[in-house]
Amino acid sequence: MITIVGAGPAGSYLAYLLAKKGEDVTIVEEHESIGSPIQCTGIVTGSIEKFVKLPNNVIANRCSKVIVVSKNNRIVANTDEIVMWRNKFDEFMANKATDVGVKILTNHQFINFNNKNSIRIKNNNNNHIKNIESEIIVGADGPSSAVAKSAGLKTNTKFYVGMQAKVKLKMDFDAFETHFGGNFPNFFGWFVPESEDTVRLGLGAFKNAKDYFYKFLEERTGKKEVLCWESGIYPIYNPKQIIQKENIYLIGDAATQVKATTGGGIIPSLKAAQTLCDCIINKKNYNKELKKHSGRELLLHLKIRNILNKFSDKDYDYLLKLMSQEKVKKILKKYDRDTPIPLVLNLLLKEPRFLLFSRFVI
Ligand SMILES: Cc1cc2nc3c(=O)[nH]c(=O)nc-3n(C[C@H](O)[C@H](O)[C@H](O)COP(=O)(O)OP(=O)(O)OC[C@H]3O[C@@H](n4cnc5c(N)ncnc54)[C@H](O)[C@@H]3O)c2cc1C
């Protein structure tokens, strides 16, 4: 038997893939309702459909344009992005898993390991503790992974605070915005329209995220009012994170598998689920296999993030100037951020001046 802790995208998709291969899989999920509370913007590139075909009820909006804003510059580029109802997406993924025979124990919380083949879980309805024996245990339990801690796999990973809220605001329904520069140190801010009059407004920061958030909100809406909060934390990809120790594995945010450029972790977790399924079924080393596959992409995102974190407002203005050229916009439309290796190579080929930013590597 295989036990997966966490019914987020990583856990449910892995469970689905393993059950399709004939494995007996149980998911332990601490919340009663899968997908709640929401701590996500839910925006993904069209690349998600390489993994799953999304039903209409999961899709809140599709954006064909992105508006990129720096202190003194602003560009509009074509794109293909899906804004999801994140809770419905998680429910959809969990239903895919149960449809192929996965058992989900909701309202049950992983507490710790008794030994490498036995875990303690608590029934949150009545506080009863019981043990589950399992040949394989997977921590898909998000950025604060209790599985990683209890298995001794926690490293000194850095986290962003992602402050996000739903806000009443009318904006172009077809376009989402990203904002860069001094008001968004080490990350960026976003407006993502989910309906004609409601947007998901947020930003990431290492510290003082709330102050930056209210400044951003007030500048745009003139008020400090939000409809509801959807904040959380995201880990920065840590290539040194051990993701397999004997029969214990980590995946998704628990394994820091997040694009450091954007904080996006949904598609990386689906990619990692395919790798981990193959490793479990064919007894391969997951630490090595992940590095060979999506690990390379995550490393590239990390390198780009380290460069961006050294940018001044002037550097962002210049970056947008280069991006405003039609030849660059075509590349940005053809390759999305979930195929970063061809994206970066083609950008450098078409516009070698991007190489000027390599001075920040030193
Ligand atoms: C503000 C914000 C905005 C974001 N926006 C985007 C975005 O637009 N696009 C994108 O791709 N990514 C985004 N992300 C990142 C994305 O949300 C995560 O990368 C993604 O959810 C990771 O999936 P996961 O399955 O690894 O973990 P999670 O989705 O966190 O799922 C973990 C599951 O484990 C359960 N769990 C935790 N502890 C236990 C326990 N002890 N016992 C049992 N169950 C447990 C939780 O209840 C949860 O259901 C955002 C993150 C934040 C914070």
Image (cartoon, rainbow, N blue to C red):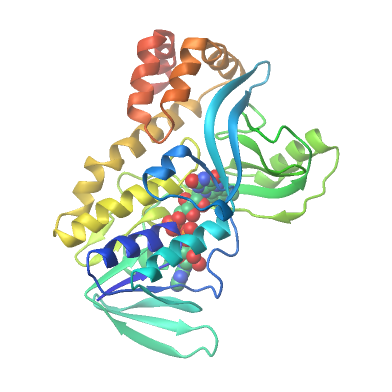
Which image quadrant: the N terminus? bottom left
Position of residue 171 in the picture relative to residue 96 (left or right): right
**Picture layout, residue 322 above or below residue 173:** above
Q: Can residue 241 be seen here? A: no
Would residue 252 be found to the left or right of residue 63 on screen?
A: left
Q: Quadrant of the C terminus?
A: top left
Q: Return the residue found at the far front.
A: 56
Q: Position of residue 22 (x, y in %)?
A: 22, 69
Report the residue at 49% width, 27% height from top.
Answer: 308
Residue 193 in the image: state x and y as whole percent.
68, 41
Of residues 208 and 351, the one drawn nearer to the viewer in this rendering: 351
Report whether residue 325 is seen. yes
The residue sitting at 79% across, 33% down in the picture is 219
Q: Where in the figure is residue 164, as x and y percent of width and height? A: 65, 48
In the picture, residue 279 is in which quadrant?
bottom left
Q: In this view, does 285 lie to the left or right of 172?
A: left
Extreme-right residue of the structure: 222
Asked if residue 121 lies left or right of residue 133, the reply is: right
Q: Residue at x 31, y 44 (%)?
A: 239
Q: Tell which of 95 and 68 is nearer to you.
A: 95
Residue 205 location, quadrant = top right
The image shows a total of numbered marks equal to 0
Q: Which of 283 and 234 is in front in this view?
A: 283
Residue depicted at x 45% and y 83%:
122
